[in-house]
Amino acid sequence: MILKAENISKRYFRKTGAANNFYAVNPVNLEIKSGEAAVLMGRSGSGKTTLLSMLSGLLAPTGGKVWMDGTDLYSLDDRALSRLRSEKTGVVPQGRSAIDTLTVLENILLPAQLYHQPLPEKAAAQWMEQLGIAHLRDARPAELSGGELRRMAIARALAQEPEILFVDEPTGDLDDENTRLVLSSLYAYAHENGKAVFIVTHENDALKYADRAYRMDSGNIT
């Protein structure tokens, strides 16, 4: 798996007295490879989530191209792009993404059910154990803390074994111990399974687990 971004940018039109354009992300070039964990640091509002959304096939860039194993993501129609995302990518968004009527285990298995794929019950059990939520498998989301919900969302993405995993602020609701647990688990997923992981965070400790590190400020990346 090789993901390449070539001069991708995102421009929004807004009107503040006079019409103008606002760049959330200025032209960016980067590459993410299998077996690597890449970390993108930056303050809130710097454009990190917008960039993650473009890289993961969720938001079309205003300019430039995103290549995944030689495929230009945004040259695909909606159906083909959705299929590629379901087969190769996993995304853990910032916000709450649990279905309240399902148990923790059912939430983790849900993506496979939606796409009529074999249920990854063994992988789900392994990642729940790894992330310290195995005892909550039959609990409902309303019974979980914010940090437990976060780890459930990460376990759900990891259980699908995507070729590239995009994680937005994975440690925002976690204490120090669970921050280390999550970051080391993401790093291990990349290195032990030969997958690619792209982590957006403001957590400085994440740099200890990064093979590549980028910083974003006002839409510019270094």
Image: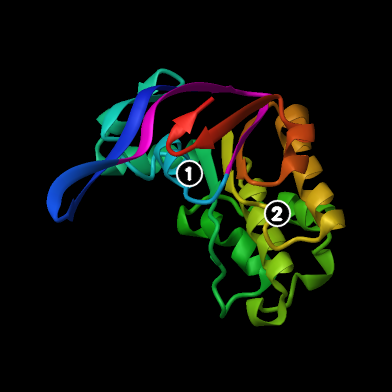
Does residue 11 appear to the left or right of 142 in the view shown?
left
Residue 191 lies in what quarter of the image?
A: top right
Q: What number is the disc on residue 67? A: none
- Check residue 46 for magenta coloring: no
Q: Name the residue under label 1.
A: 46
Q: What element carries label 1?
A: loop
Along the line of sight, which residue is nearer the eye, 112 or 201? 201
Against 133, residue 30 (above or below) is: above
Residue at 60% across, 66% down: 107
Along the line of sight, which residue is nearer the eye, 73 or 106? 73
Residue at 71% across, 24% down: 211
Does residue 42 appear to the left or right of 9 in the view shown?
right
Q: Is the magenta stretch mostly helix, strand or loop?
A: strand
Which three-letter amino acid code belongs to the residue tagged 2? Thr
Q: What element carries label 2?
A: loop
User: Mark 1 and mark 2: span between their CA atoms?
Assistant: 18 Å
| Residue 180 percent coordinates (x, y) | 83, 48
Against 115, residue 164 (above or below) is: above
Q: Earlier in the sequence, mark 1 or mark 2?
A: 1
Q: Name the residue under label 2.
A: 171
Residue at the outermost left position = 18
Q: Is residue 79 visible?
A: yes
Which three-letter amino acid code belongs to the residue tagged 1? Ser
| Residue 113 percent coordinates (x, y) | 52, 59
Against 193, residue 52 (above or below) is: below
- Residues drawn in magenta: 23-42
Q: Residues within 10 Å of mark 2 (few under 14, many from 20)?
A: many
